[in-house]
Image (spheres, grey):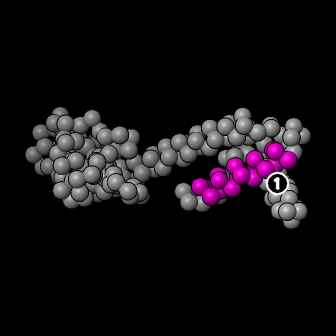
């Protein structure tokens, strides 16, 4: 998602000269910040083919708004204004982190819904199929959660999406593992 900003093409051109022709400048949905003096701050990430995005922005775009007071326009960027920018960057990073968590939560909920649609809804409705499906599903979720850094929340997210408490889900996963090890021992 690139900003709808008249200088986007210039920033993309600058990023491509630094990072290569496939670089794309993106705001990742972060809204620009305007401070009380009329200085606008935007964080930008450079998307590069085959690479993960950096945790923090690759570029910070600061400019004096055209409608800022004549005094601010005359002074331009000052050390004092630059110190204010740290607060805006921190706020923006926090918002993006919260948005990513919400997106991840929604994705897990969708995956749980798919799991529930394709499998018996409880162990009573089809124990062997339910437990085998639950174990496959949980192993995929757990692996992805570790890779993406949300493993501590995985059990809680899945339990909530399934309408179970955490202990019930934990118990069902344990049972699924036991059943899988028993069926492997029978082979």
Whether residue 80 is visible to the viewer of this picture, yes or no, is no
- Asked if residue 149 lies left or right of residue 117, the reply is left
Q: Report the predominant secondary structure element of the magenta stretch.
A: helix
Residue nearest the observer in this picture, 149 or 84: 149
How would you rate the neighbour count of disc 1 (Cα within 10 Å): few for under 14, some for 14-19, many for 20 or more?
A: many
Residue nearest the observer in this picture, 140 or 168: 140
- Asked if residue 78 lies left or right of residue 100, the reply is left
**Position of residue 132 measured from the top left corner of the image (x, y, whole percent):** 79, 50
Residue 180, relative to residue 166: is it above or below? below
Residue drawn at (88%, 62%), measured in percent from left and top?
186
Residue drawn at (62%, 58%), measured in percent from left and top?
143
**Position of residue 21 measured from the top left corner of the image (x, y, whole percent):** 22, 53
Residue drawn at (81%, 44%), measured in percent from left and top?
130
Residue drawn at (45%, 45%), measured in percent from left and top?
95
Q: Is residue 56 magenta?
A: no
- Asked if residue 126 lies left or right of residue 110, the reply is right
- Residue denoted by label 1: 176
Residue nearest the observer in this picture, 32 or 3: 3
Q: Quadrant of residue 122?
A: top right
Q: Is residue 138 magenta?
A: yes
Residue 161, relative to residue 148: is it above or below? above
Residue 147, relative to residue 160: is it above or below? below
Image quadrant holding the C terminus, namely bottom right
Badge 1 marks a residue whose secondary structure is helix
Range shown magenta? 128-145
**Position of residue 19 measured from the top left corner of the image (x, y, whole percent):** 25, 58
């Amino acid at each position: 998602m690139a900003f709808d900003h008249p200088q986007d093409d210039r920033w993309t051109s600058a990023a491509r000269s630094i990072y290569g022709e496939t670089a794309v400048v993106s705001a990742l949905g972060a809204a620009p910040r305007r401070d009380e003096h009329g200085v606008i701050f935007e964080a930008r990430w450079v998307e590069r083919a085959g690479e993960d995005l950096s945790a923090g922005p690759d570029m910070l775009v600061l400019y004096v708004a055209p409608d800022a007071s004549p005094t601010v326009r005359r002074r331009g960027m000052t050390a004092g204004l630059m110190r204010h920018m740290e607060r805006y960057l921190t706020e923006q990073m926090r918002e993006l982190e919260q948005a990513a968590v919400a997106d991840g939560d929604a994705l897990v909920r969708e995956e749980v819904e798919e799991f529930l649609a394709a499998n018996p809804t409880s162990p009573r409705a089809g124990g062997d199929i339910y437990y085998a499906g639950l174990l496959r599903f949980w192993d995929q979720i757990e692996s992805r959660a570790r890779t993406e850094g949300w493993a501590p929340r995985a059990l809680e997210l899945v339990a909530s999406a399934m309408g179970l408490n955490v202990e019930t889900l934990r118990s069902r996963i344990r049972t699924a593992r036991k059943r899988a090890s028993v069926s492997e021992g029978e082979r």
